[in-house]
Image: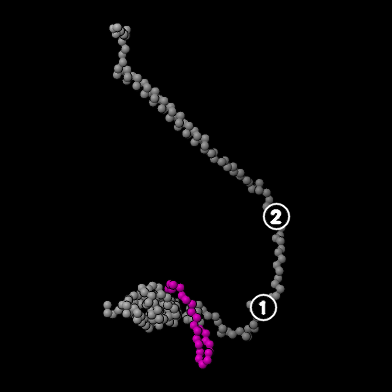
Amino acid sequence: MAAEEFIIPFNVDYGAIELKRVYQRFTLWSLGLATVVQAIGLGSYWGSVWLAEEEEPIRTVRILKYTDLGPPPSLQNQQAAPNVAISAPSVKPSIGIPVPVPDAEVSPEQTFATQQELSQAVSEVSTATTGGGDLQITIDEEPPDFVAVEKEPSIVKKVEPKYPEIALRAGLEGTVYVKMWVDKEGKVRKVVILKSDAEIFNQNAHDAAMQWVYTPALMQKGPVSVWVAVPFKFRLSNK
């Protein structure tokens, strides 16, 4: 059977021109549709934001006139504060009550010490007799870590520490930093070890520092007690 031939009675134009016409039309439709969708989305977002906004509260200000205030309250009709009963002490105090003294018995030469006289006082000294001599006890408070002075203490007597025998045989060297409390008389009242290279030197440095003597530190024309830091170096002469 021979192949049949189909003949199209009319000509159909299809090519680049038709494709260009079709894609331009659909491009315009897609662009318009995308614009509408975007407009709907933005409108929904801004609409929800506008609906979520709270309205500012309305403040009402009322202006009053002086005549609307009325008369002031009366001072005579005010209620008095209630009286509170306070129990009196059963026994009157007998200490601290001043007793008048006649003018003839008052000494005109008796005066109070001034601030300058009080600052020049060195320390309170009490004397007691025991056996065959007098015992003087000086009361002096321990100073703080830092005391402002006009004149620093200077060394009057300096005692070198003894080299420990064990450290001498072992050939050990080191430095001991001590803090000495110098009182108002220039004597060392207390020694504190601040830093030490070896504990074997601590006791000898402490004993030597307790024998030092200073001139007292001065502040406002009066002696004061201060802390003085001194390093004690233990060095061998043959090295």
Sequence-wise, the earlier of marks 2 and 1 is: 2
Q: Is 44 or 56 nearer to us in this picture?
A: 44
Q: Is 97 or 144 nearer to us in this picture?
A: 144
Residue at (40% x, 83% y) in the render: 211
Three-letter code for the amino acid on which mark 2 is drawn? Ser
Q: Is 3 or 211 nearer to us in this picture?
A: 3
Residue 47 position in % (x across, y down) = 49, 33
- Mark in front: 2 vs 1: 1
Whether 195 is among the magenta residues is: no
Quarter location, residue 148: bottom left
Is residue 168 left or right of 44 when viewed as pictured?
left
Residue at (46% x, 75% y) in the render: 143
Q: How many marks?
A: 2
Residue 74: which numbered mark, if any? 2
Residue at (52% x, 37% y) in the render: 52
Q: Which residue is mark 1?
A: 94
Q: Which residues are drawn in magenta?
A: 125-149
Residue 135: which numbered mark, if any? none
